[in-house]
Image: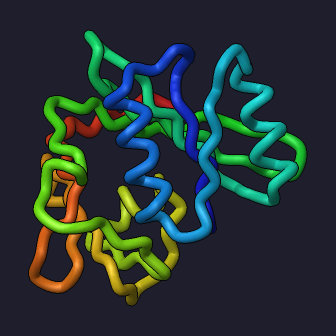
Amino acid sequence: MPVFLSSSRKPCARTRTLLKDFNRLLPDSVMVNRGKTGVSGLVDAARNKGLGRVAIVGDRHGNPGEIRFIELDEDSWDWLPIRLRIRSIKLARDFDGPMPKASALEATDGMIANAFGIESEEGDVRMDFDGTKLSFWKGDDEIGPRLLVEVLKDEA
């Protein structure tokens, strides 16, 4: 299931860059600049594109600070009970070599894969999550971005 990527309002440059990195790595994802659009507007835009998941990257002190997820049904939507608080980040441009456009993404953690709407079990790029570090690999080479995160679970 492709994901609809957006930011909080007035995102910093590093948040916009992270969204571009995610857009290259998450197959068939759609990225939009949010501007003044409210959450319901993002949901409508995602629904119009036929997408079932929205990921919103928010800022904290001039850096990407949190990723929240929305699950869409045909006539309703709800926040997923998982958030990723970003503690530190190394963007793809900080790694050696060009970042490929992924045609399929493989994920090693079911909870994070579900949040991003990843259903593939095999891919040319792999997303690893070890409980605190979210990283992307092509073969044996880490291609970025790398995020140190804290998984927050909201009470349902």
| Left or right placement of residue 154 versus residue 84 in this view | right
> At 45% from the left edge and 48% from the top edge, which residue is drawn?
20
| Left or right placement of residue 2 versus residue 59 in this view | right
Indicate the quadrant where residue 87 lies: top left
- Choose between 49 and 76: the one closer to the eye: 49
* Quadrant (top left/top right/bottom left/bottom right) for the N terminus: bottom right
Extreme residue in the bottom direction: 122
Indicate the quadrant where residue 13 lies: top left
Query: Could you tell me residue 44's position as x and y percent?
Result: 83, 38
Q: Is residue 128 visible?
A: no
| Left or right placement of residue 25 versus residue 75 in this view | left
Indicate whether 7 appears above or below 135: above
| Left or right placement of residue 134 versus residue 120 in this view | left
- Choose between 24 and 46: the one closer to the eye: 24
Query: Could you tell me residue 59's position as x and y percent?
Result: 37, 19
Colour theme: rainbow
Q: Is residue 131 visible?
A: yes
Indicate the quadrant where residue 123 lies: bottom left
> At 73% from the left edge and 33% from the top edge, which residue is drawn?
42
Query: Could you tell me residue 90's position as x and y percent?
Result: 16, 43
Q: How many marks?
A: 0
> At 47% from the left edge and 64% from the top edge, which residue is drawn?
26
Extreme residue in the top direction: 61
Extreme residue in the front direction: 97
> At 48% from the left edge and 37% from the top edge, which residue is drawn?
81
- Choose between 141 and 45: the one closer to the eye: 141
